[in-house]
Amino acid sequence: MINFLKDSFDKMTTSEDRSEIFNLPNCITLLRLTVIPVLFLLLLSPGRILSMAIAVLFIIASITDLIDGYVARKYNIVTTMGKFLDPVADKLIVSTAMIMMIPIGRIPAWIVAIIIMRDLFVDGVRSVASADGLVIDASRLGKQKTLCQIVAVSALLIHYDTVFGINAHVVGMVVLYLALVLTVWSGADYFKKFYEAKIKK
């Protein structure tokens, strides 16, 4: 049975197809997704140690995002699958972390809702643009938004006072409000670029 399934898979996918999916950058991206089930431990209302452990895993997962991008560019293995997986993985991890922190009171639900709705809106606009053959480059605002979200979520996951006496939750909330502004701003900027490109076409 195993040999039959393997033969069937080999027939359906060429070696080129498999290299498109299972190259090193994509494997790093897929590995990054394994942090998502760990985030569900937040529902246990973790104390200081578990909060720190989950935050460290989240930060490591965020760092691997830089690694897979670097590897893809350095060795020229940028693929269509990679372009799809990378942003999806980022959004899944960040969104899951924020959603899991709502029940334990670490993040306001309305902020999470706005951030997720913005991402869905931009994804919808991107799909329409792609169907029309329009290419809209990612803006610096979008990158700044992502960075602020990662910093905010990391601090909110830590939650407690740090060894330097700084309250991580307060820091996280300050950065989160900045991330919220950049989230809405970058979403509006993306739609503006789409609208202008549509008119020019």
Image (cartoon, rainbow, N blue to C red):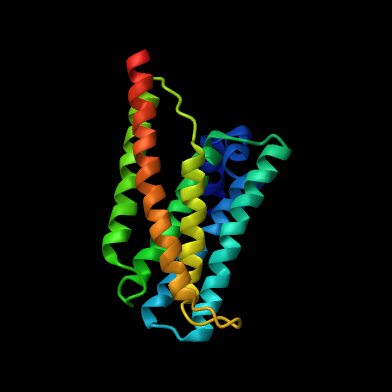
Q: Residue at x 38, y 35 (%)?
A: 189
Look at the picture and state if 115 lies above or below 173: above
Q: How many labels does the image show?
A: 0
Quadrant that contains the C terminus: top left
Q: Which residue is drawn at 33% across and 52% down?
A: 116
Looking at this view, name the residue that lies furthest to the right. Answer: 75
Looking at this view, name the residue that lies furthest to the top. Answer: 201
* Residue 89 in view: no
Look at the picture and state if 187 lies above or below 175: above
**Left or right: 22 as drawn, with respect to 114:** right
Q: Position of residue 29 (x, y in %)?
A: 57, 52
**Left or right: 109 as drawn, with respect to 6:** left
Q: Position of residue 146 (x, y in %)?
A: 48, 51
Q: Position of residue 174 (x, y in %)?
A: 43, 65
Look at the picture and state if 114 lies above or below 59: above
Q: Where is residue 10 in the image (x, y as percent from the top left)?
A: 57, 39
* Residue 177 in view: yes
Q: Residue at x 41, y 20 (%)?
A: 133
**Nearer to us in this view, 197 or 15:** 197
